[in-house]
Amino acid sequence: MTEQFGDLRELYQELIFDHNRHPRNYHELPDANRQAEGYNPLCGDRLTVYLRVENGRVEDASFVGHGCAISTASASLMTEAVKGQPVEEVEALFRDMHAMLTDAHPEGRDFGKLEVLSGVREFPARVKCATLAWHTLHNAIATAGDVAQTE
Ligand code: ZN
């Protein structure tokens, strides 16, 4: 691992390392009804996001793939953050995360643990590593997939 974290604060670094070493919800989801693949050619990060959406709510979320520490930690933190959330809230979080990672901190949003990912703004080459999981999540929600939908 030759990640360059520069002056990311130590706490942030630890959380990212932890989620990279021990990614949460890192498995396929046999009963998923949403699924999307993401690829970041700049870094070589690849991942698949699985969701089980029922009654307008993300009941379960998981991912598999391989990539750098930032992409894996971002996907791990994301699955934790969206589990049990209404789809509209997940989509709002996607928009706010995208804004937070690429531009400015959106007003009135407490990102909690996800705040650790904001450090990538200082490393423009790594921004796509952090946003990959979120774009893939967004695509998974937008595409119904090939599983019949009930809602
Ligand atoms: Zn990467």
Image (spheres, helix red, strand yellow):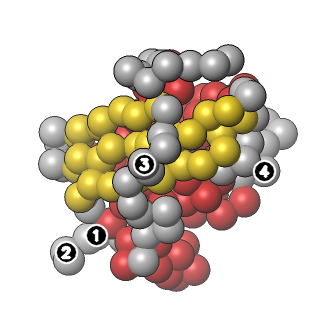
Report helix, strand or loop for mark 3: loop
Query: As rendered, which of 36 and 7 lies closer to the eye?
Result: 36
Report helix, strand or loop for mark 2: loop
Q: Amino acid at mark 1?
A: Gln
Q: Which quarter of the picture shows residue 66?
A: bottom left
Single out the mark in the foreground, 2 or 3.
3
| Earlier-in-chain disc, 1 versus 3 | 1
Report helix, strand or loop for mark 1: loop
- What's the mark number on residue 2? 2
Report helix, strand or loop for mark 4: loop
Q: Alpha-carbon distance for marks 4 and 1?
A: 27 Å
| Earlier-in-chain disc, 4 versus 1 | 1
Tell me if 149 is positioned left or right of 57 in this view.
left
- What's the mark number on residue 30? 3
Query: As rendered, which of 150 and 103 lies closer to the eye?
Result: 150
Q: Amino acid at mark 2?
A: Thr
Query: As rendered, which of 40 and 57 lies closer to the eye?
Result: 57
Badge 1: residue crowd in 10 Å (few <14, some 14–19, many ≥20): few
Q: Alpha-carbon distance for marks 4 and 2?
A: 31 Å
Give the residue pinned by disc 1.
Answer: 4
Query: As rendered, which of 31 and 44 lies closer to the eye?
Result: 31
x then y, percent, for residue 79: 55, 53
- Proximity of marks 2 and 1: CB atoms separated by less than 8 Å: yes
x then y, percent, for residue 112: 72, 59
Give the residue pinned by disc 4.
Answer: 110
Residue 9 visible in this rendered orientation of the protein: no
